[in-house]
Image (cartoon, rainbow, N blue to C red):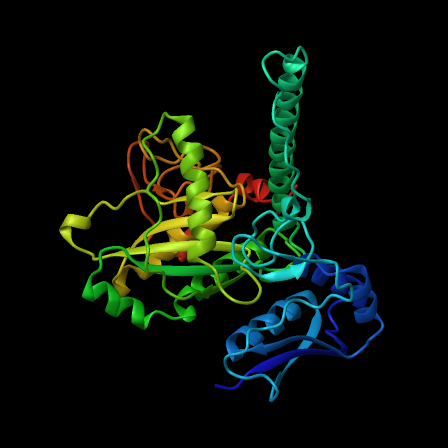
Amino acid sequence: MPRYQVIFEGEFYADRTPESAVALLARRFRLTPDLQRRLLAGERLVLKQGLDEATAARYCDAAAHCGVVFNRQADAAASESAPPLPEYSPETGNRVTCPSCGLPQVKATTCLQCGAFLTAQAAPRTAWPSPPAPADPARGRGGSLFRTVRVTLLLLVLAAAALHTWMTRVWTTDWLEPLWVAVYPIDAEDSPRVKAYLERLTSADLQPVADFFARQARAHGLALERPFKIELAPAVADLPPPPPAAGNPLKTAWWSLRLRSWARSAGAMEGPAPDIRVFVLYHEATAANEWLDNSFALPKGLIGVVHAYATPGLAPRNNVIIAHEILHTLGARDKYDPATGLPLHPAGFAEPDKMPLYPQAAAEIMAGRIAWSTTVARMPGSLDEVVVGPATTREIRWTD
């Protein structure tokens, strides 16, 4: 199997200045200042070696979205079994290996591939002294110091996590470049029919979702022509941990941590990591499955879990749910009454000022249903019957 290397030869795309392109690339790949300087100087750099063709293409594609031209070339020196080299760094001491996925890389706050925190790895471990004997009058002071340090460290970890979440939200909704959404199909029933359906799935089946967002972005005056790049990722064998029953905050918090850990493992792929991961659990379209489990999303971790039908006729409806959960990961809120499922007026209506108000012709994406009357609403058949309303555009920062 041929191996490839990724090379920079001083080229940039014309739609961005070299300075803005390198700034975007530095943010996505956590580049060192020295490497940024060398990119701007137009030096020829071999950035990665020993890659398979698909992974090399992902690096080139990710760079292209930032405005930088990476070229893929055959790597005759790399054997098929040789592991890919770590990210380029001119400083041999400025390296770290991710404890979660094992990826070698330049020191950064979070892992380039799986998003795990790396800061703690860089700090040397310190062995705490044993507490003094009971007769030692300083025992109380030592125990108090230990508790103070432990609480301080915990608060620092929580503050770092909160800061990381806030920075992730700001970065993902600045809309300077398209967000890469990877959709991972899962056979939820270990069914031959579902398996056969998944074997026929391609990224083209998800293009209506990307096209929908492009139309809506244009309608709301967003400068970015295509806000999302949506691709089909490899199938996942394991099921995500099921959410707990509502009403227990501790169990919900623990489940959230488990889900994020599972998503990093199940959605791991070589090369640049996607911005948003959506795991779609496909079920047979039978009477027994008339009502599927609720889909959901986590803004922390940018993870969506969708329950969908494995039949071509319902693919357009599946795409509505996928689009809904993608926006949930970016902070968009539901706009329907959870008790009735009916859209809330005015935010959950596609045409809140229409006279007469009913029936509506389309659904607001975060309401998920078309309001026909004060008591009746139906699921849209496809994204052609859906819009992104003003309240949602403010929540995802398309508009002020």
Q: Residue at x 39, y 47 (%)?
A: 361
Number of marks: 0
Residue 360 location in percent, x, y? 38, 43
Q: In which quarter of the image is residue 28?
A: bottom right
Foreground pick, 258 / 230: 258
Residue 242 shows in the view: yes
- Quick check: 96 above or below 338? below
**Which quadrant is the C terminus positioned in?**
top right
Q: In this view, does 24 lie to the left or right of 270?
A: right
Q: In this view, does 127 lie to the left or right of 353?
A: right
Foreground pick, 83 / 299: 83
Residue 66 location in percent, x, y? 68, 65
Residue 337 location in percent, x, y? 37, 31
Residue 1 location in percent, x, y? 47, 86
Q: Residue at x 22, y 56 (%)?
A: 189
- Quick check: 199 above or below 120? below
Q: Residue at x 43, y 63 (%)?
A: 208
- Quick check: 339 above or below 133? below
Question: Residue lying farthest bottom?
Answer: 76
Foreground pick, 305 / 383: 305
Question: Residue lying farthest left?
Answer: 287
Foreground pick, 155 / 342: 155
Q: Is residue 67 left or right of residue 214?
A: right
Residue 344 shows in the view: no
